[in-house]
């Protein structure tokens, strides 16, 4: 099995690229964003707490996200690997993911970072907000807070995976197909 962390700021195209990876490689897509949105939609206790936090532009606490991830990994079946999208977001989460993977006798193969400039991120997220009707994708100030939070708390994960020699980076500009080709080259190395 090949487990890959798809990394980049909000709006980098991780969800789109993850779906292409699922189709081509039969990976399981583990998106903490999707899991949280499902909890919110179902108005679960976790979902109600998460909605309040997300709407303020903050990240959901580690313990909530880690538990959702642990349960998905434990129940994984018929997959050639996992694409982690939106997790881990902090060094503490990365350490927790390492613990979870070790307990399941698995390991992360690589982190693929999609690099993109803030201006392009804002443009993409606003466009996505028109289609998805997600309130957090329709407010520029909330988007800027999310980018700022990413830059302060999440971008440092690159160093964590560089130390493990698992970090790879691609340019996130260009067509969806062009970006996917770059990802495939890394996976198939």
Image (cartoon, rainbow, N blue to C red):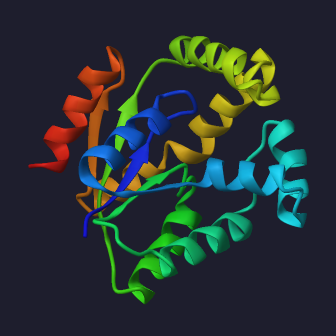
Q: Quadrant of residue 114?
A: top left
Residue depicted at x 54% and y 74%:
96
Q: Is residue 61 above or below residue 25?
A: below
Give residue 150's position: percent from left, percent from top. Answer: 60, 38
**Horizontally, is 26 left or right of 92 in the view?**
left
Give residue 131's position: percent from left, percent from top. Answer: 67, 19
**Horizontally, is 49 left or right of 187 in the view?**
right
Residue furthest to the left in view is 189
Give residue 151's position: percent from left, percent from top. Answer: 57, 35
How many numbered circles does the render carry? 0
Q: Is residue 49 above or below residue 176?
A: below
**Horizontally, is 54 left or right of 52 in the view?**
left
Q: Quadrant of residue 175?
A: top left
**Horizontally, is 154 left or right of 105 in the view?**
right
Q: Is residue 70 above or below residue 40?
A: below
Residue depicted at x 35% and y 16%:
173
Give residue 167's position: percent from left, percent from top. Answer: 28, 50
Q: Is residue 105 above or below residue 140?
A: below
Residue depicted at x 90% and y 55%:
48
Residue depicted at x 71% and y 15%:
130
Q: The N terminus is located in which quarter?
A: bottom left
- For the residue pair 58 and 78, the one nearer the viewer reads as 78
């Amino acid at each position: 099995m090949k487990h890959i962390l798809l990394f980049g700021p909000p709006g980098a195209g991780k969800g789109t690229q993850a779906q292409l990876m699922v189709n081509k490689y039969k990976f399981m897509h583990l998106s903490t964003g999707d899991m949280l949105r499902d909890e919110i939609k179902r108005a679960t206790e976790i979902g109600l707490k998460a909605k309040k936090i997300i709407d303020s532009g903050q990240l959901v606490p580690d313990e909530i996200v880690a538990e959702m991830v642990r349960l998905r990994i434990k129940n994984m079946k018929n997959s050639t690997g996992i694409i982690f999208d939106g997790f881990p977001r902090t060094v503490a989460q990365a350490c927790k993911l390492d613990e979870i993977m070790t307990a399941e006798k698995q390991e992360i193969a690589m982190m693929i970072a999609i690099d993109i400039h803030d201006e392009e991120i804002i443009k993409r997220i606003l466009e996505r907000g028109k289609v998805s009707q997600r309130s957090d994708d329709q407010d520029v100030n909330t988007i800027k807070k999310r980018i700022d939070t990413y830059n302060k708390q999440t971008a440092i994960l690159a160093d964590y995976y560089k130390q493990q020699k698992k970090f790879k980076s691609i340019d996130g500009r260009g067509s969806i197909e062009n970006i996917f080709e770059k990802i495939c080259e890394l996976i198939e190395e």
